[in-house]
Image (spheres, rainbow, N blue to C red):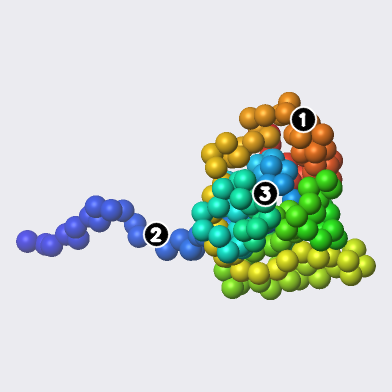
């Protein structure tokens, strides 16, 4: 009796697929977190944006405590993004265009250390990209950039009512006069980066 090769029930063996690039997270401070959140929620390649408080010394601070300026925390957004669709450098380029990185502890009429400019990385590999983009911003602003650079530390999620604030309250006074112009500036300056569904 002739032996016949048994069919392979799983079909032909495919070569292993290349490893997928993991999503990244960067934490950014640039004044009121409502402004940054409203912009990054429109960015193609950004997967999620969360408002919070970071790089201070207090545990689980409230919005009122952070606004008092004594917690050391900055109002921040944590931006989760797909590096296959938008690079960290591109995320940071948007950041430097939508706020003023040359004013220490303030953005417009918002004054205090909680409104400082800051970039807080989550992985050691991000630091070199952060510093390279920072150096480009320094050249563009003739050495006046005061953005704080540090690893992300002691991060706390902000209260639920702060999440998606501009999307939920577009007619609120601060949103109309402060947030909306930043969103419009982003749309004009980075047309190619605006999410197609936005």
Residue holding disc 2: 14
- Kindly indicate the quadrant of the structure image that contains residue 56: bottom right
- Labels 3, 1: front one: 3
Q: Is residue 49 visible?
A: no
Does the residue at mark 3 contact the one at mark 1 (Cβ under 8 Å)? no
Whole-angstrom CA distance, mark 1 to mark 2, is 58 Å
| Residue under the point 63% across and 52% down | 66
Residue 69 on image: x %, y %: 68, 55
Q: Is residue 26 above or below residue 157?
A: below
Q: Is residue 191 left or right of residue 74?
A: right
- Dot 3, crowdedness within 10 Å: few (<14), some or many (≥20)? some
Disc tally is 3
Helix, strand or loop at disc 3? helix
N-terminal of the two: label 3 or label 1?
A: 3
Secondary structure found at label 2: loop
Left or right: 111, with 11 as reference point: right
The answer to whether marks 3 and 2 mark residues whose Cβ atoms lie closer than 8 Å is: no
Q: Which residue is mark 1?
A: 173
Q: Which quadrant is home to the C terminus?
A: top right
CA gap, disc 3 to disc 1? Answer: 18 Å
Q: Position of residue 52 (x, y in %)?
A: 59, 50
- Nearer mark to the viewer, of 3 and 2: 3
Q: Which residue is mark 3?
A: 67
Q: At 81% from the left edge and 70% from the top edge, which residue is drawn?
A: 135
């Amino acid at each position: 009796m002739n032996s016949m090769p048994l069919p392979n029930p799983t079909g032909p063996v495919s070569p292993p697929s290349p490893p997928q690039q993991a999503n990244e997270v960067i934490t950014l401070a640039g004044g009121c977190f409502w402004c940054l959140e409203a912009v990054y929620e429109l960015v193609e390649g950004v997967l999620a944006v969360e408002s919070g408080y970071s790089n201070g010394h207090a545990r689980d601070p409230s919005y009122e405590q952070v606004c008092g300026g004594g917690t050391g925390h900055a109002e921040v957004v944590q931006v989760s993004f797909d590096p296959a669709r938008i690079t960290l450098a591109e995320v940071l380029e948007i950041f430097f265009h939508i706020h003023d990185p040359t004013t220490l502890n303030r953005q417009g009429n918002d004054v205090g250390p909680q409104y400082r400019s800051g970039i807080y990385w989550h992985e050691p590999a991000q630091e070199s990209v952060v510093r390279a983009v920072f150096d480009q911003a320094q050249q563009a602003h003739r050495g006046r950039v005061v953005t704080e650079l540090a690893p992300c530390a002691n991060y706390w999620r902000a209260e639920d009512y702060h999440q998606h604030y501009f999307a939920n309250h577009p007619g609120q006074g601060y949103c109309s006069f402060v947030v909306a112009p930043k969103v419009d500036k982003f749309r004009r300056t980075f047309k190619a980066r605006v999410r197609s569904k936005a």
